[in-house]
Image (tube, rainbow, N blue to C red):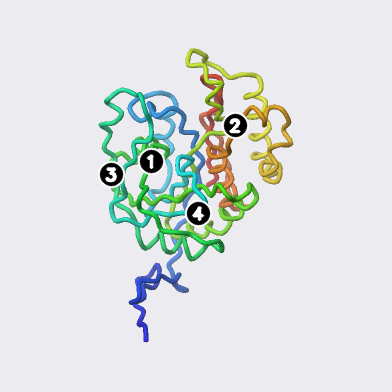
């Protein structure tokens, strides 16, 4: 017969499975954040975006752990890492050598990863062939540069529609009361075919889609975010694949009715849109 030992947060059973503990302690609620991570160069640059990420981290209670849902892990089905030291993935090409020398290596979190699996009704597969990609570390290296907070990453399910991704976010919102910050990293607009490196602002269609999403979010009309195609032509231009948009849906699903919603880094650059949303 399997014996369980209560570790406070979850029960670890001898056969290696994990069960959410009924008497898990309730911590102060942590935020769910959507970050428009933009160019990987943000990892080594000091600009208005990175300065805001640093400031936000200083103003929040320090999390016990971080679950990152990054646009750069777009998989068939939902996958999650549980390695004690997740791989650092340099999933960008043709950038200055200094970017590839960024060494952001936080510990992983096996216990919380398996706690997360238990909360999700769909099948979740542990996969440590991935780790933390630049959608995660390019942001966290500014928010928590010491890299001493455990981080584990969950993929965006490419087979799930927008409503299902939102529902997965709802299922994992309990993590916020257990010391876990939920980080969604992507971009509301991500159309690389339209990137203009010399353009300071955004195209008209990018601004229109930005306004549609931002207005829907601030009014907490999340149904219109899920049904983003209602925005018309601007939605058609905003992205061709939803990998960068989807992390926003997980974060909105993880939001709670009494959250105070903050929009920061509200701007357009290189023709596209970057803005960050902070339900707290």
Is disc 4 surrounded by few (<14), some (14 to 19) or many (20+) residues within 10 Å? Answer: many
User: Callout 3: helix, strand or loop?
Assistant: loop
Q: Earlier in the sequence, mark 4 or mark 2?
A: 4
For the point 49% across and 37% down, the residue is 35
User: Callout 1: helix, strand or loop?
Assistant: loop
Which residue was labeled with disc 4?
Answer: 78
* In this rendering, position of residue 208 left or right of residue 114: right
For marks 3 and 4, give the one nearer the viewer. Answer: 4
Between 180 and 245, the residue placed more toward the observer is 245
Q: Earlier in the sequence, mark 1 or mark 4?
A: 4
Tell how many labels.
4
Which residue was labeled with disc 2?
Answer: 239
Between 97 and 253, the residue placed more toward the observer is 97
Which residue was labeled with disc 1?
Answer: 133
Q: Earlier in the sequence, mark 1 or mark 3?
A: 3
Which residue was labeled with disc 3?
Answer: 105
Q: How far apart, in angstroms, are the residues tagged by discs 2 and 3? A: 31 Å
For the point 44% across and 47% down, the residue is 68
Query: Residue 78: percent from the left, percent from the top?
Result: 50, 54
For marks 2 and 3, give the one nearer the viewer. Answer: 2
Which quarter of the rendering shows the N terminus?
A: bottom left
Query: In the figure, 252 relative to 27: above or below?
Result: above
Tag 1–tag 3 contact (CB < 8 Å)? no
* In this rendering, position of residue 142 left or right of residue 277: left
Query: Residue 60: percent from the left, percent from the top?
Result: 43, 44
């Amino acid at each position: 017969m399997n014996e369980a030992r209560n570790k406070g947060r979850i029960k670890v059973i001898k056969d290696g499975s994990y069960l959410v503990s009924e008497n898990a302690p309730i911590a102060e609620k942590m935020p769910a954040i959507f970050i428009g991570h933009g160019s990987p160069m943000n990892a080594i640059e000091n600009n208005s975006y990175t300065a805001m990420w640093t400031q936000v981290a200083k103003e929040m209670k320090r999390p016990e752990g971080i679950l990152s849902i990054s646009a750069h892990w777009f998989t068939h089905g939902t996958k999650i890492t549980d390695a004690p030291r997740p791989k650092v993935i340099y999933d960008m090409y043709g950038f200055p050598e200094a970017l590839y020398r960024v060494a952001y290596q936080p510990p992983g979190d096996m216990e919380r990863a398996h706690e997360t699996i238990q909360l999700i009704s769909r099948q979740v597969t542990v996969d440590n062939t991935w780790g933390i990609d630049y959608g995660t570390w390019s942001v966290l290296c500014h928010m928590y540069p010491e890299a001493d907070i455990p981080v584990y990453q969950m993929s965006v399910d490419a087979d799930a529609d927008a409503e299902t991704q939102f529902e997965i976010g709802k299922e994992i919102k309990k993590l916020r009361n257990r010391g876990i910050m939920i980080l969604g990293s992507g971009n509301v607009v991500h159309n690389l075919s339209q990137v203009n490196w010399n353009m300071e602002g955004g195209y008209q269609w990018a601004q229109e889609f930005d306004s549609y999403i931002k207005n829907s979010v601030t009014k907490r009309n999340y149904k219109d975010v899920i049904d983003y195609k209602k925005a018309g032509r601007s939605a058609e231009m905003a992205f061709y694949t939803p990998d960068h948009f989807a992390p926003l849906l997980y974060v909105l699903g993880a939001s709670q009715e009494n959250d105070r919603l903050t929009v920061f880094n509200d701007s357009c650059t290189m023709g596209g849109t970057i803005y960050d949303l902070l339900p707290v």
